[in-house]
Amino acid sequence: MDKLKLVEQTVVRDDLPEFTAGDTVNVHYRVREGDKERIQQYQGVVINERGSGANKTFTVRKMSGSVGVERIFPLYSPFIAKIEVKKKGRVRRSKLFYLRDRRGKAARIREKDSTPNKKQ
């Protein structure tokens, strides 16, 4: 195994949950202001995942008032305190860039049914 892969394995964290495009996540991000540090929450829909290994990033989109705001997070950043998956979305594609053109109810994502097949 080459040295680059060995270094990447030390960066990869195993305490992060599984999520994909369409899921609503709450990212707890450590923000440094001077010598102080606080945790800022950023909740929105994952619209994009890219990269692999230690270089994996994901894009979260939220509405702030009537303005859409997107932020790209490195998945294995030491500044990410934790990630909570609020809702699992049911989508048919891996890149949800079409949400940029949608407003209000048109931008809704169906929720994935988490219950297994029930017998009635």
Image: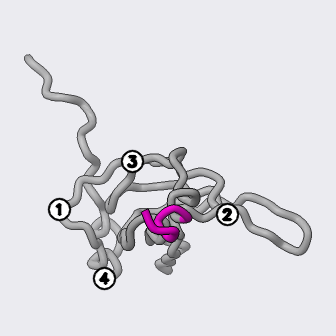
* Type of the residue with mark 2: Phe
Q: Secondary structure at mark 3?
A: strand
The residue pinned by badge 3 equals 87
Q: Mark 2 or 4, which is nearer the eye?
A: 2
Q: Looking at the image, tell me whether mark 2 or mark 3 is earlier in sequence order.
A: 2
Q: Position of residue 23 (x, y in %)?
A: 37, 55
Mark 2 to mark 3 CA distance (whole Å): 23 Å
Q: Which mark is residue 79?
A: 2
The residue pinned by badge 1 equals 92
Q: Mark 4 or 1, which is nearer the eye?
A: 1
**Which residue is painted at 51% across and 47% down in the image?**
14
- Report whether residue 7 is seen: yes
Which image quarter: residue 105? bottom left
Q: Secondary structure at mark 4?
A: helix
Q: Position of residue 79 (x, y in %)?
A: 67, 63
Q: Mark 2 or 3, which is nearer the eye?
A: 2
